[in-house]
């Protein structure tokens, strides 16, 4: 299992989709290829943009299917971040 503390990578507001893509390509995909579970820790993050969350997880859902969400735990999300994650997940599931 890998534990990624996002605040160390993005600060208090997760908005940079290039950083999200880098996390996805260099941390999430390699972990999933090794069949590892992932904790995305949003502790200290006050907010996130939809584009950040989309860049972080949408390609994973395309590549691995909706089942990939069983391998990813979203930890310490405030209500705002939870809502944005839900929007992106719902959007991706509707595309299938």
Image (tube, rainbow, N blue to C red):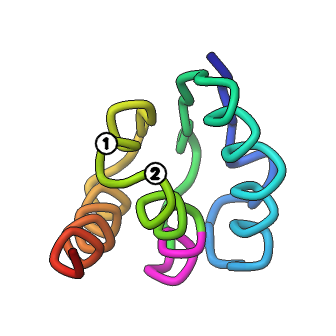
Residue at 21% x, 74% y is 96
Q: Could you say where residue 23 lies in the image, as x and y percent from the top left? A: 75, 55
Q: Could you say where residue 28 lies in the image, as x and y percent from the top left? A: 67, 44
- The magenta-colored residue range is 49-55
Residue at 44% x, 67% y is 62
Residue 72 in the image: above or below residue 26: above
| Dots 2, 1 in contact, CB < 8 A | yes
The image quadrant that residue 55 belongs to is bottom right
Q: Is residue 46 left or right of residue 89?
A: right
* Badge 1 density bin: few <14, some 14–19, many ≥20, Cα 10 Å: few
Q: Could you say where residue 44 lies in the image, as x and y percent from the top left? A: 58, 45
Does the stretch in magenta take in 52? Answer: yes
* C-alpha distance separating marks 2 and 1: 7 Å
Residue topped by disc 1: 67
**Nearer-the-camera pick, 46 or 77:** 77
**Nearer-the-camera pick, 26 or 46:** 26
Most common SS among magenta residues? helix
**Circle 1: element type:** helix
Please state, as top left, top right, bottom left or bottom right, where the N terminus lies in the image.
top right
Q: Could you say where residue 77 lies in the image, as x and y percent from the top left? A: 39, 45
Residue topped by disc 2: 64
């Amino acid at each position: 299992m890998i534990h990624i503390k996002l605040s160390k990578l993005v600060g208090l507001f997760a908005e940079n989709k290039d950083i999200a893509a880098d996390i996805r390509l260099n941390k999430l995909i390699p972990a999933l290829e090794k069949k590892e579970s992932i904790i995305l820790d949003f502790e200290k993050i006050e907010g996130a943009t939809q584009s950040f969350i989309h860049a972080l997880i949408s390609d994973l859902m395309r590549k691995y299917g909706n089942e990939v969400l069983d391998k990813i735990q979203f930890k310490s999300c405030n209500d705002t971040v939870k809502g944005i994650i839900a929007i992106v997940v719902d959007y991706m599931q509707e595309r299938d």
